[in-house]
Amino acid sequence: MYFTDRGIEELEKRRGQEEVTFEWLAEQLRAFVDLNPDFEVPVERLATWLARLDDDDDDE
């Protein structure tokens, strides 16, 4: 198990039954980066990865 899995598991346990919009998620990511600017690059990569999940690009 990766260290980050603990946070993911907590998120799933605490909020797994909630429904959210991508608009809400984007607002939360912006707020997180505002509070933690050192995480700007990883958050940007995550957001880009989520945005492109359905792309048929097999280059990855």
Image (tube, rainbow, N blue to C red):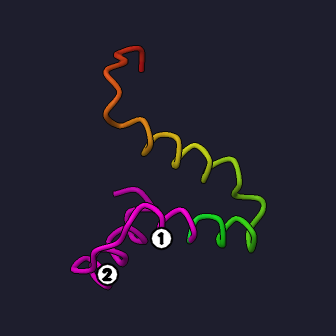
Q: Amino acid at mark 1?
A: Trp
- Which segment did they paint magenta? 1-27
**Label 1 with label 2: CB-CB less than 8 Å:** no
| Residue mark closest to the camera, 1 vs 2 | 1
State the residue position of label 2.
Answer: 15
Task: Work out which quarter of the rendered image holds the N terminus and state it.
Answer: bottom left
Q: Main secondary structure of the magenta part?
A: helix
> Considering depth in this image, is 12 or 22 the residue closer to the camera?
22
Q: Pick out the residue farthest to the left.
A: 17
Q: Which mark is residue 46?
A: none
Whichever of labels 1 and 2 marks the residue nearer the N terminus, that label is 2
Residue 60 is inside the magenta segment: no
Q: Which element carries disc 1, helix, strand or loop?
A: helix
Left or right relative to 50: residue 14: left
The residue at the point 69 percent across, 58 percent down is 39
Does 56 sit above or below residue 7?
above
Q: Can you give x and y, in whole percent of width and height, for residue 27 in the image?
A: 57, 69
Residue 24's disc is 1
Q: Give the percent coordinates (x, y) of residue 8.
A: 37, 67
- Quick one: SS at disc 2? helix
At a point 52% along the width and 41% down the height, the residue shown is: 48
Seen at 21% across and 80% down, the residue is: 17
Number of residues whose C-alpha sits closer than 10 Å to that of mark 2, classed few (under 14), some (14–19) or many (20 or more): few
Residue 44 position, x and y percent, is 62, 47
Q: Amino acid at mark 2?
A: Arg
Q: Is residue 24 on the magenta stretch? A: yes
